[in-house]
Image: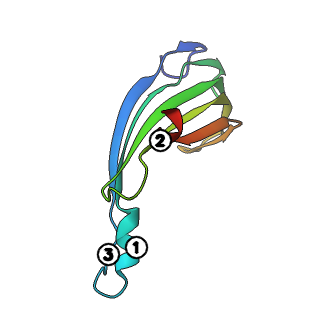
């Protein structure tokens, strides 16, 4: 695919853990410990070597370690445009997305 114009499919999975520290000093922050699993698709079209446009969609499963916190789901969908400056290895991406976060208890 490289710098040639055309369709560029994209999909993936991400997992990360968020841990708080120093529970001895302030144990209330331990309520924020959680893991998040995200699946995403990001199909795009490279218009020219410097510009790519597409749609970003992801769904996240949010699981708190503490049972007093409600687990949740997150949905993110929206268009994006990515521009690469000439002679630069980095790019700038702008996205407009609709976000919906909800507790799993709200679904019941």
Judging depth in this view, the residue of 10 and 2 nearest the camera is 10
Q: Which of marks 2 and 3 precedes in the sequence? A: 3
Disc 2, SS: helix
- Answer few, some or many: residues within 10 Å of disc 2's Cα (few below 14, many 20 plus, some between 14 and 19): few
Left-right relation of 48 to 61: right
Disc 3, SS: loop
The residue drawn where x is 40% and y is 63% is: 32
Q: Which of marks 1 and 2 precedes in the sequence? A: 1
Q: Position of residue 47 (x, y in %)?
A: 68, 18
**Marks 3/1: CA–CA distance:** 8 Å
Q: Is residue 31 above or below residue 71?
A: below
The residue beneath circle 1 is 29
The residue drawn where x is 55% and y is 27% is: 57
Checking the image for residue 21, the label placed there is: 3
Judging depth in this view, the residue of 102 and 13 nearest the camera is 102
- Answer few, some or many: residues within 10 Å of disc 1's Cα (few below 14, many 20 plus, some between 14 and 19): few
Q: Quadrant of residue 76?
A: top right
Which residue appears farthest toward the top when viewing the image?
6
Q: Nearer the viewer, mark 3 or mark 1?
A: 1
- Answer few, some or many: residues within 10 Å of disc 3's Cα (few below 14, many 20 plus, some between 14 and 19): few
Judging depth in this view, the residue of 1 and 21 nearest the camera is 21
């Amino acid at each position: 695919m490289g710098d040639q114009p055309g369709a560029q499919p994209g999909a993936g999975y991400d997992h990360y853990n968020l841990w708080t520290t120093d529970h001895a000093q302030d144990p209330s922050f331990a309520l924020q410990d959680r893991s998040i699993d995200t699946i995403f698709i990001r199909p795009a079209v490279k218009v020219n070597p410097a510009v790519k446009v597409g749609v970003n969609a992801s769904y996240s499963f949010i699981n708190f370690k503490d049972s007093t916190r409600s687990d949740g789901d997150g949905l993110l969908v929206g268009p994006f445009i990515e521009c690469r400056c000439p002679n630069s290895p980095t790019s700038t991406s702008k996205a407009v997305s609709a976000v919906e976060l909800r507790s799993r208890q709200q679904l019941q």
